[in-house]
Amino acid sequence: MEPGKDLAEITAGLDRLYRSRTSADGFLNAEGLIPVAVAPVEARAFDSYDAVRAALAALDERVADADIAPLRRDYILEMTDSLCALMDTFEGRPISFADRLSRQIRIAPGPVDEAILDEYRVVMRDALDELGYRSGDLAADTARWEAERQVPPEQVIERLADLTREARERTARFMYDLSAEWIEPVGVTDKPFSAYCDYPGRKVLLNLDFPYTIYDLKHLAAHEAFPGHLVHLGLREIYVRDGAMPLDGAQVVTSSASSALFEGIADNGMAFIGWTDTPDDQMAVNLQRLRSALRCNAAWMRHAEGRTMEEIVPVIAAASFQSEETVGGRLAFLNHALRAPFVYAYWAGERAVDAVWQTVAPDERARFWASLYGQMHTPATIARFRETHG
């Protein structure tokens, strides 16, 4: 018994029900629960969220008794629970932000510990010292480093395209040869994201309201395209079509048990293709990690502590060495009901994948990537990738 078809059809039915009850306009609402599906899925017909819950409970019972690999069983049970938690939010049932993080994103809830933030700052300080930025003031040195590497706005799209081509070549050399694929960078404004992979349209939408260093663009080339979302979705499309991956692998499901690994794969893209070998890279990677962690803390302040955005933005701006305007733009989606916990998927996902990547020997990399890209995971199951997945 392979339950992937059942899970995919139930999830598609939940998406249809959610969309039918969401009348608000806007980019994020238009995405629904499933922003991308790389294969057709027949949605189950549901007239209530209780009907979806009943279908998921029945699936859980079948999975518990099925002869399937333990990792696959655990993934499905985590995924169905995350969908039930999502429905609580859709219906306005009481559910704490901590429970949304633990049940939907499948991570330990809470703000990112200051000791972890300090780890990032220490690496940044060492990299800046090596690069000659030695004022002793981390904020001032970071600002100078970024200013001297900022790409002029009129050159951002061209530079992103150049870096995407380089990332494509490195991905073909080290990982998967998808050199026939391309995704076109396109500038947009007034959007609730910095960049977005439009996989069906083969476009990377880059928000030109924000400043970018050359290292920001390098990160985005890897994250959104090679070997990130474009490669990940391209492989899942091939694997589902060829029967090597169950049908639920066709779906990207927002704020679910699969979200942290979807973003974690992309955020580790530069490491996978050996693109992080200079002091500038180490500075950029750890600055990215610091800012990602602080966006998690902003979400915790907003949804667990009930603080206003007017209170939050100045605190996060100072700690992340950014302007309040930039931080306000990057946190614009925090009040979206479906997306509220999703910001944790980036930081926690990057950390979950990196923790395993650090243990993978060079001769294990192909096996690791086969599991990472070809099987569905949560932070808990990827840590056990060496077990038989089925």
Image (cartoon, rainbow, N blue to C red):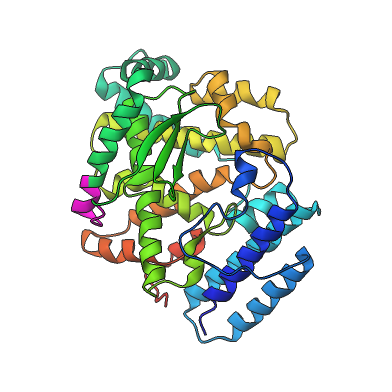
Asked if residue 256 lies left or right of residue 145, the reply is right
Q: Is 23 part of what is drawn in magenta? A: no
Residue 267, position as x, y percentages in the image: 40, 45
Residue at 37 percent across and 35 percent down: it is 185
Residue 329, position as x, y percentages in the image: 57, 27
Residue 148, position as x, y percentages in the image: 32, 16
Name above or below for residue 350 compared with residue 50. Answer: above
Name above or below for residue 209 compared with residue 225. Answer: above
Q: Looking at the image, can residue 58 be seen? A: yes
* Magenta-colored span: 169-178
Quadrant in the rendering for residue 158: top left
Instruction: Looking at the picture, tell me which residue is in the foreground, 256 or 318.
Output: 256
Residue at 26 percent across and 54 percent down: it is 178
Instruction: Looking at the picture, tell me which residue is in the foreground, 355 or 326.
Output: 326
Instruction: Looking at the picture, tell me which residue is in the foreground, 371 or 141.
Output: 371
Residue at 69 percent across and 27 percent down: it is 309
